[in-house]
Amino acid sequence: MAWFLGEGEISSRIAPLLIEWSPSKVRVYDPISGHSLLGATISDCLNGSSRGREAVIAISRQSALVRSVNVPNAPRSEVSKVLELQFEQLLPFSRGECVTGFRLGDKVSTTGRLAVVGAIKIDSLERALTDAKALGIRVRLVLPVAFGSWLLAKSQGQQTAAVVEINGELMSVDVIAEGELRHSRSLPTPESVAEIHDEIERTFTIAGIPAGPTIAAASPDVQASFRVDRPAISYLADPAAYEKQLFTFELPGRVQALEERAANLRAGRAIGAALVAVLLGSYVYNTKYKTHTATGGRSATLNRQMKAATTKRTSVDAKLATIANADQLLGVAFNPGQKVSDVVTVLSATAPHTIWFTNIVIGHHALMSVAGFATNDADISHLANDLSGDARFTEVKVVSASQTLIDKKPITDFTITGRVLGLLPFDRPNPVINPRKVVKQ
């Protein structure tokens, strides 16, 4: 049976079930039939006939948080460390209570890249996975349902838009800006068309995005620039088309198990390669050396071949030494002396306990910018002075400091800028000494 997604036909196969999950309400959408089933749990919607079926679990907007934040243009592993320092400010609950994932935007600017962060409480994720496992469903991905709206906007060629869907008593509004999911919101369905329009405008304002066109997903009551006749979740029906661009929520134990498995596989490959080398060496010894020893020594032809091989090895060793010297020279010249995570660690360790950061921007050949709040003005000056005395930074200065109130308590909103010194000096390394010694035969 062939099924369709947008305008393209997907190859003949069973499409995954799409499960929009929340602790109190579940909707299962079957992209083959186009029908939706509602219930309090997954088992209320499905029966044993779904056993073995693949599924994508899309966590509802009430249960999965979506936030966007600018991060340095750095490798994903480094960005992950930077986000760890900001999760407490991005999320309304403790980092230990939830699992997170993030997508890095494709565009790079002077402020870095955009990271779209998703989070769900661990106990909610456990419940969703347990419900699916009880029915024999194979879960391929777990992600925020709002990414269905992101794919819908892409299918319509819209870089900036609000994807709106009314599903009974709830209305969802997902804001996409510059091709990235920026804000996701769910609210009780307004009573009039005018109120629906006002809520869409309000969502753009909350996201800090200028108002753009509206895309209505299976919602005829919404005034929209574009319309599609199926729900936004249906755009998650082909995981192969987007899973490398997004992320999946994993339980902490599952993440650790995957990392250990990868390490074991790497170790196994190394042991296997060593074993092959030993067996090959044993074979050469037994078939060549012992044979010639038994016949009273090597022939003149074998001596000539070994001498030629030794000469060639000497030439290759010389070339390898030259290449190694060049590689070491380039490594000294171009490898950074410190990573983004190193800079963030130093900033966190240097800051007094009366200061907390709200934004850190670090870019190559660009000013570092550190913004935050302080309960003591003097500590801002102390932080700037301490950073100025660190060899990692230069041109450090306080560019703004203004008084404000949080919960009726006076605090200072500040910004410090400076430059990060990240490259090692260009210096010629010591030559590489070839450890091999050529023994004349």
Image: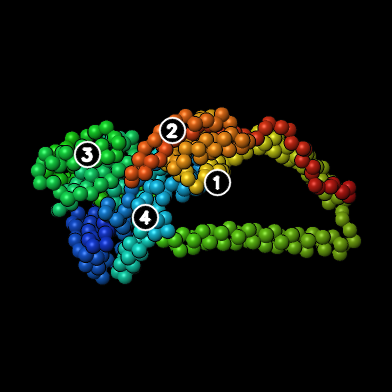
Q: How busy is the neighbourhood of tag 4: few (under 14 within 10 Å), some, or many (20 plus)?
A: some
**SS for callout 1:** helix
Q: How busy is the neighbourhood of tag 2: few (under 14 within 10 Å), some, or many (20 plus)?
A: some
Q: Position of residue 261 (x, y in %)?
A: 52, 62
Pick whichever of labels 1 and 2 is earlier in the sequence: 1
| Label annotation for residue 243 | none
Q: Nearer the viewer, mark 3 or mark 2?
A: 2
Pick whichever of labels 3 and 4 is earlier in the sequence: 4
Res 119 visible = yes
Which residue bears the numbered disc 3? Answer: 202
Q: Nearer the viewer, mark 4 or mark 2?
A: 2
Label 4 and label 2: CA atoms lie apart by: 29 Å
**SS for callout 3:** helix
Residue kind at label 1, given as amino acid type: Ala
User: Between residues 268 and 279, which one lies in front from this camera angle?
Assistant: 268
- Colouring scheme, one of rainbow, by chain, secondary structure, one colour: rainbow
| Above-or-below relation of 264 to 393 | below
**Direction left: furthest residue:** 192
Pick whichever of labels 3 and 2 is earlier in the sequence: 3
Left or right of 384, for residue 223? left
Residue located at (38% from left, 47% from top): 90
Residue kind at label 2, given as amino acid type: Ala
Residue located at (45% from left, 63% from top): 253
